[in-house]
Image: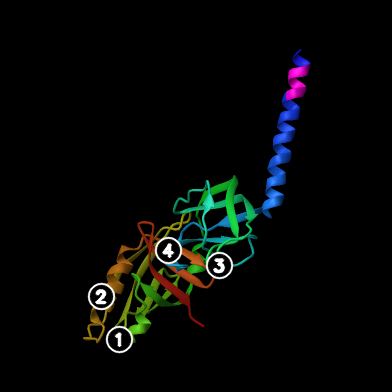
Amino acid sequence: MKLLLYLALFVSLTACSFQNNKKQKDSGETDHISTYYIAPYKVSCVGVAPMQCLLVKKTPESNWEYFYSTIKGFTHEAGIEYTLKVKETTLKDVPTDASSLAYELIEIVESKAYGPKATNLHDIWGVVELNGINPLSKQCEQTLELNVAEKTLLGKAGCNDFRGQFTTSESSNAITFENLIATKMICPNQDLEDTYLTTLESVNAYFRFNQNLFLISDNLVVIKLKRMD
């Protein structure tokens, strides 16, 4: 009797699996499992509308790319790097303004606090976004030059120059900017200059993204900079 029940259950499960596979084939959907590396912070991006995007790459050596979709079952925590196994399903007959792929979390392979090398900061950076505003659109060039060995900084707030010090952590992406001193010329974009210096003093973390440097205050990207040639 038990044997008959086991056989009936096996046939039922096999039939269900066959029906599910048949439905998937009939619908034109196909699945693929990929490894995703997820950056520790989301960034502002523009899809159909302005939004916050994950940064994703499929190999450790690749550049980060904006990810405009969502991964079903995955919740991102700021400051954490992830390695995921993700099921990619190719969809059939989707609207022209929708993605042809659906994403679902299979497994979190690894999650760890972001701990970069501070030497990645050593460069000259140009501000491309300050609290959502591009200073270059207002003819205001703002820069930041970081000397990691000396823990000193120089920069342009606009028409005024400034200098100061900064500290970093050996075990995390924490950073603080201190003792900022600026020249006192009256400038056309004085409010923007003041905002830049005030925002720098509020920064408590950083993230190097390809040739970009994001400065973060309480898990929110407040200054975006690009490496200057």
Where does the magenta region start and end?
4-8
| Amino acid residing under circle 1 | Cys
Q: Of the residues under marks 3 and 2, which one precedes in the sequence?
A: 3
Q: Residue at x 61, y 60 (%)?
A: 93
Label pair 3/4, CB-CB below 8 angstroms: no
Residue at label 2?
Answer: 194
- Horizontally, residue 36 falls left or right of residue 155, namely right
Label pair 1/4, CB-CB below 8 angstroms: no
User: Element under label 2?
Assistant: helix
Residue at label 1?
Answer: 159
Q: Residue at x 24, y 87 (%)?
A: 188
Give me the disc on residue 136: none
| Amino acid residing under circle 2 | Asp
Label 3 vs label 2, nearer the camera: 3
| Amino acid residing under circle 3 | Thr
| Residue 18 position (above or below residue 77) | above
Label pair 3/1, CB-CB below 8 angstroms: no
Q: CA distance from mark 3 to mark 2?
A: 45 Å
Residue at label 4?
Answer: 51
| Residue 227 position (above or below residue 2) | below
Q: Of the residues under marks 1 and 4, which one precedes in the sequence?
A: 4
Residue at label 3?
Answer: 96
User: Element under label 3?
Assistant: loop
